[in-house]
Each structure stands twice: as structure tokens, then as C-alpha cells.
Image (cartoon, helix red, strand yellow):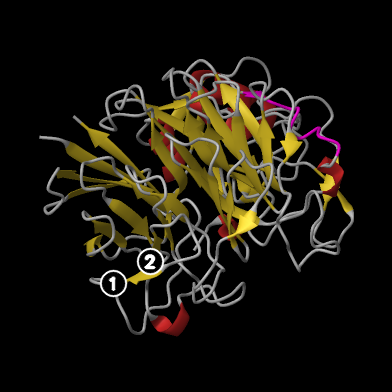
Amino acid sequence: MIRVELPAHLRNLARVVGEVQLEVEGQATLSSVLDVLEARYPMLRGTLRDHVTGQRRPFVRFFACQEDLSHQSPDTPLPAAVASGAEPFLVVGAIAGGQL
Amino acid sequence: MSQVRVLVGTRKGAFVLESDGKREQWNVSGPLFAGWEMYHVKGSPVDPNRLYASQSTGWFGQLIQRSSDGGKSWEPVDNKFVYDGVPGTHQWYDGTPHPWEFKRVWHLEPSLTDPDTVYAGVEDAALFRSADGGKSWQELSGLRKHGSGPHWQPGAGGMCLHTVILDPSDPARIYIAISAAGAFRSDDSGQTWQPINRGLHSAQIPEPTAEVGHCVHHIAMHRSRPNVLFMQKHWDVMRSDDAGDNWREVSGNLPTDFGFVIDVHAHEPNTIYVVPIKSDSEHFPPDGALRVYRSRAGGNEWEPLTKGLPQRDCYVNVLRDAMAVDSLDSCGVYFGTTGGQVYASSDAGDNWAPIVRDLPAVLSVEVQTLP
């Protein structure tokens, strides 16, 4: 079970409260977790990564275990603590991404 | 008694302002989609309960929201705006080729006949259409693939398609405007397009009378006279009497002919409104006095409308989609400012009063007149 923490705007959009818990078959990677997340909550499609290229949106960050995973390959396995559910996978709006 | 519903898009959410036909007491609700930029919210003319809203942030990109109950509830619909084929390039600010990149939806224009059909004007400039209530979007790529496309360039606000006008007398005719490419018309439901910029003169481009490259800020039409168009350009207020084939300047006695909004009285097709802004760099009213100018002659002869508007120390802007009119017997006129005020006049502009004063910067104002 993977625990995902979404930022407030996306929790509102997906109409969820608190963490999202996902069952990911096989190895948990950035890509596989986002695939499952978007399948469960289709309204999130396009908000985290580009519809066509799958590239992370520039002002979205992925953190876990006090590390920035944003620049890793989408196929990189997530830390074992995230895969086991001990630590959450954090989706974060970058500090630079807001509007006045 | 009739009712009025004003749909306000702001930098940090949408607001709904409602009143009865007297337009004296207002109920303000919102913010909807708090924290998101709401570039435009507009209702279907054939089903006033069907609303569409453009919602975006720098973090999470573009969403489209749809309501089928007049704004009481909303559902996100498709946000996949993918250019048709290989997007190609347009000019960047420095004159170099730059690939077309989708950024946001500036304007949503619901069909005049079908509540499930809606057009989206986007940045980088293109026109999309949905025929299923926003569940899917298809680009009308004949516009972007017009031969002049590689020469289009962004204005200061981005290369946005911000105006979409559907001709009530001819379902196949669509007008659009792009900053800074100019105005275009399709006579075949958006399959092919022609620039309609003859008569425009823009000193900011190398060839001031070029076929494309003009920074058109907004265009307005009265549905009873669809061949007559009024334009607020970067500088100059313009008029066409032949569906955009030719334009002539009607700035007349305006104190400055720079501005963003332009609109037409609901019942008097020759009565038009603008809000003069000092200049392309000083985006506030001349002399710190907020004045709407009205022409009852279709241009050239303008009168300032000041009653109820701040006449000193006012340095707000009024953005291109932030003026609208209702269709009650005494035409109501509404506009919103970057200072967060929404002003209303229930007597065609003679007298004004703020409905609200302290919203986030207003990006768009639309009005629905309800039975």
C-alpha cells in the first residue's frame, strides 16, 4: 500500500480528505504510482504531468523520505519505506509555482 | 421578476453576484475554486444553468469546470488540449521561432444553439471546440495552420486567443482575435480562416498595415447587426461595417484610445462602451479618474460616464473580458477592475455603483439575464 499526500488544491479537486492510499501492483515507481493515482482520480490527469509527454509539470515536486525525487527517471523504484507504506509519497506545489 | 447573475473570474477564484431586476441589492457568493486563476466563466445562452469555467494555476495547469445547475455544483471535465498534428513554431518575443505550447484557456464561448457545444480560445493561440459538454476537445486547426501562423508573436500577456464571437445570423461564421496576430474570420464553421485586419494601423510592428501582427485587445458585436464589429485595439478604437473586411478608426474625442474592453448596449446596436486606459505602459485611467466612455453614434463622438465612479486616486486597469451587459429593459452595464471592484450601472451607464469592492484582481465579467 502506497500512501500519497496531495496538496490542498488537488485534494479539493479529487474530493479527498487526508492521505490517499493506493495499491500498486509490481514495483512501485514514480510512474506506476502516478498511473494508479490518475486511474483512481481521473480529474487529476494533466495536473501533475503532461497529458501527451508524461513529463512532470514544471512546478510540481515529488518528495519522499526527505529527498527530492522530482528529477529521477519515472521508472526509478521508490524508496522501500514508501513502497511498504511506512513513509508517504509527497506531491508538492513548488515554492516558485504560485501566482500573486 | 427577472434576475441577473454576474459571473466574475478573478486571479484567486470565481464569484457569483446575483440580484433581482432592480439591481439594487446583491448577493455575493464565492470564492469558487479558491486560489485558482479563473480566466473566464460563461453561461450557455440556450440553457442558463449550463456554465463553463476556465480554471488554472502555475502549479497544476489547466482545468475546465462545468455546472448544469447554474453554479450550485461543478464537475471537472476534460482538460486535454492537444494541438492537431505537429504544432510548428510562431515567433518568440525576440523574433526567433518558438514551438507552440499550450498554456491556458483564456475564453470559453458556449454555442448559441447547443448547450453541449463550446469553444475555447487558448494560449498559445488556437481555437478548440467541444461538442460533448467539455468531455473532449478538438482543435480547429485551420486557424493555427493559416499560412501566417509562423509570423504570429505574443503580446505582453502571452500569445492568447481571447475573443470568440459566433454570428447569430450565420452558424458557419466565427470571429476570433489574437494578441498579437489580429482578427480572423471563418465562414465555414472554423475549417478555414482569413485575417480581417485591413484598415488597422499599428506603429509597433515593422509594417504598420500588415495583414497580421496587430494587437487586437477585444471585439464586440450586437446580435441584431452581426456585420458591424467594434474593436478595442492596443491603441485605437475601430469599427467595421462589413464583417471585418475593412476597419476605420472611431476613437474620435476619447482622451486616450488605448484600452482593453469594448461592449455594445443590449438594445441599441449603435451605443458602445470603452474604458480608456492611459497608455501601453501606464495601465490605469488618465488622471486617476475612472471613466467609462459611451458613444451613441457607433463611435467618434464619446461622452464620459463618471457618476458613482472614483474620480481621483484611481489606478486600476480593466482587462479585456471584464465588461458585459445584461438584457433587461434598462440595459445594465458591468465591469471589473484589477483592484477587485465590480461596478454596475442599471441605466446604461448614467449612474454607477460598486457591487463589491475588494475581490482579487478581476479577469472577466459575464452576465446572465434570467427569467
SS at mark 1? loop
- Residues behind callouts 2 and 1 on a single chain: yes
Q: The N terminus of chain B appears in which quarter of the rendering? A: top left
Label 1: how many Cα within 10 Å (few below 14, some 14–19, many 20+) = some
The residue carrying mark 2 is: B292
Q: How many marks?
A: 2
* Magenta stretch, residue numbers: B138-147
Q: Is residue B145 magenta?
A: yes
Q: Relative to B185, does residue B240 appear above or below in the rendering?
A: below
Label 2: how many Cα within 10 Å (few below 14, some 14–19, many 20+) = many
Foreground: B108 or B361? B108
**In the figure, is residue B2 to the left or right of B49?**
left
Q: The C terminus of chain B appears in which quarter of the rendering? A: top left
Q: Main secondary structure of the magenta part?
A: loop
Foreground: B243 or B48? B243
Task: Residue B334: give x, y in percent of width and height.
Answer: 32, 54
Residue at 52% of width from left, 41% of height from top? B107
Residue at 86% of width from left, 44% of height from top? B150
The residue carrying mark 1 is: B309
Label 2 chain ID = B
Label 1 chain ID = B
Residue at 16% of width from left, 50% of height from top? B23
Task: Residue B220: give x, y in percent of width and height.
Answer: 50, 46
User: The residue under label 1 is which amino acid type?
Assistant: Leu
Of mark 2 and mark 1, the one earlier in the sequence is: 2
SS at mark 2? strand
Q: Are marks 2 and 1 in contact (CB under 8 Å)?
A: yes
